[in-house]
Image (cartoon, helix red, strand yellow):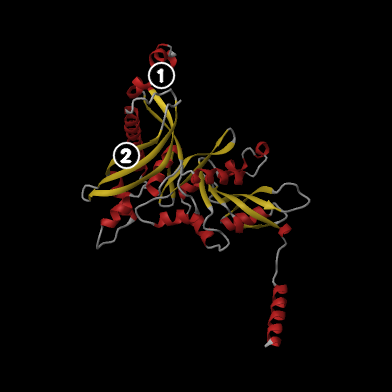
């Protein structure tokens, strides 16, 4: 038995010595990849890779390549470097606007077929080209642009300001009839990458852009949001009796800023926010969406007195009214672009029995649905606030 074991171990060592391997110094580990489609329908890829070369103080390098396929573009990019590019550690795949508008499923499918690519890889789109975002300000930033974008996305996901954006999450929602995915929208501010909103899809095609504050509204229908900071503008008039030195402030107001004086801005944190959808009338496509928010109030643009407990009721009513207004505006926008990230189609699908329900059918119905948004806000903590 011992002899057999020794023979097997010896044989394993011999086989292992025959397997080709690459030293780490010979590899470029792709961390971030941008994908753009050029005018002649060729794929241009922008790659940020880690290189471990003792002779080069730069840990990351940025290279581009063009080909008829993603793999071909990567091979072409390899001609510009002296190390072999390995896609096994891609943490972020970023698609240019025009590319995403044509559809990204074929590129994501390539990643899924690669066993080395993690399901938790982040997916994003840009409001320009991926190349422009990934190469902007590299000299000034002196940092890994891909890692910077990843950190920005992970921070906002952790605060529930935007929905989860992994490869697995995108593919799961895209394949689910009656709901569409959204992903972070990356743009440039002062020549630096920044999250400027979310891109919303119809199937796998980018069809619209939503501002960042509406991303949280969407996320409240996908999960329970917690600890999300939020700035809200409310009508000032209902609070006029509770504002310190209100009369003096009004008399001294700058005429050029009177419009600003019509609103009160509050900084709040959503302790817990969740929602659910009910189909009230299947024939009329009439839904009811219930939204429940527990909120802490941190700061207001003017000093409020809360000696009168009525102020808490007014704050809850006005915040709820503003959320309702924002949800109605969001639905109008989503119906215009025929994208349903909130999942009304999923609820409708559960009520359809004994027949097949197709995505095309919901595309026709979604622009005609009506929704009653019922928002309830509970103000948990507040005080004399400035």
**Horizontal and vertical percent position of residue 5:** 68, 84
Position of residue 129 relative to residue 234, above or below, is below
At x 39%, y 50%, the residue is 180
At x 58%, y 41%, the residue is 132
The label shown at residue 376 is 2
Write down the quadrant of residue 14 in the picture: bottom right
Q: Residues within 10 Å of mark 1 (few under 14, many from 20)?
A: few
**Horizontal and vertical percent position of residue 221:** 37, 47
Q: Residues within 10 Å of mark 2 (few under 14, many from 20)?
A: some
At x 70%, y 66%, the residue is 21
Helix, strand or loop for disc 1: loop
The answer to whether the residue labelled 2 contacts the one labelled 1, judged by CB atoms less than 8 Å apart, is no
Q: Report whether residue 242 is seen.
A: yes
Spatial separation of the CA atoms under disc 2 and disc 1:
28 Å
Q: Residue furthest top?
A: 251
Write down the quadrant of residue 358 in the picture: bottom left
Write down the quadrant of residue 295 in the picture: top left
The label shown at residue 244 is 1
Helix, strand or loop for disc 2: strand
Q: Is residue 213 left or right of residue 28?
A: left
């Amino acid at each position: 038995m011992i002899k057999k074991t020794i023979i097997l171990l010896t044989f394993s060592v011999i086989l292992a010595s025959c397997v080709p391997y690459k030293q780490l110094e010979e590899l470029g580990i792709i961390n971030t990849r941008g994908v753009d489609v050029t005018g002649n329908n060729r794929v241009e890829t922008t790659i940020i890779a880690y290189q471990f070369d003792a002779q080069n103080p730069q840990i990351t390098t940025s290279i581009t390549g063009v080909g008829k396929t993603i793999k071909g573009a990567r091979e072409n990019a390899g001609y510009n470097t002296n190390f072999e590019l390995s896609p096994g550690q891609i943490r972020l795949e970023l698609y240019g606007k025009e590319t995403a508008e044509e559809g990204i499923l074929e590129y994501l499918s390539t990643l899924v077929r690669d066993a080395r690519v993690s399901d938790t890889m982040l997916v994003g789109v840009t409001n320009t080209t991926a190349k422009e975002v990934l190469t902007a300000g590299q000299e000034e930033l002196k940092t890994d642009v891909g890692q910077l974008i990843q950190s920005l996305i992970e921070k906002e996901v952790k605060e529930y300001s935007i929905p989860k954006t992994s490869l697995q999450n995108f593919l799961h929602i895209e394949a689910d009839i009656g709901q569409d995915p959204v992903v972070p929208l990356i743009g440039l501010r002062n020549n630096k990458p920044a999250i400027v909103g979310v891109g919303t899809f119809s199937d796998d095609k980018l069809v619209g852009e939503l501002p960042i504050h509406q991303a949280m509204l969407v996320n409240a229908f996908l999960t329970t949001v917690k600890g999300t900071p939020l700035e809200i503008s409310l009508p000032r008039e209902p609070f006029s009796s509770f504002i310190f030195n209100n009369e003096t402030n009004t008399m001294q107001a700058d005429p050029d800023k009177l419009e600003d004086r019509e609103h009160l801005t509050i900084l709040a944190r959503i302790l817990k926010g969740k929602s659910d959808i009910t189909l009230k009338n299947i024939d009329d496509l009439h839904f009811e969406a219930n939204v429940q928010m527990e909120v802490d109030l941190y700061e207001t643009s003017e000093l409020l007195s809360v000696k009168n407990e009525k102020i808490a009721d007014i704050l809850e009513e006005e915040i709820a009214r503003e959320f309702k207004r924002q949800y109605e505006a969001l639905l109008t926008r989503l119906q215009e672009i025929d994208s349903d990230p909130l999942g009304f189609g999923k609820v409708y699908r559960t009520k359809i029995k004994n027949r097949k329900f197709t995505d095309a059918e919901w595309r026709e119905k979604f622009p005609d649905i009506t929704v009653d948004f019922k928002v309830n806000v509970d103000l948990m903590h507040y005080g004399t606030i400035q």
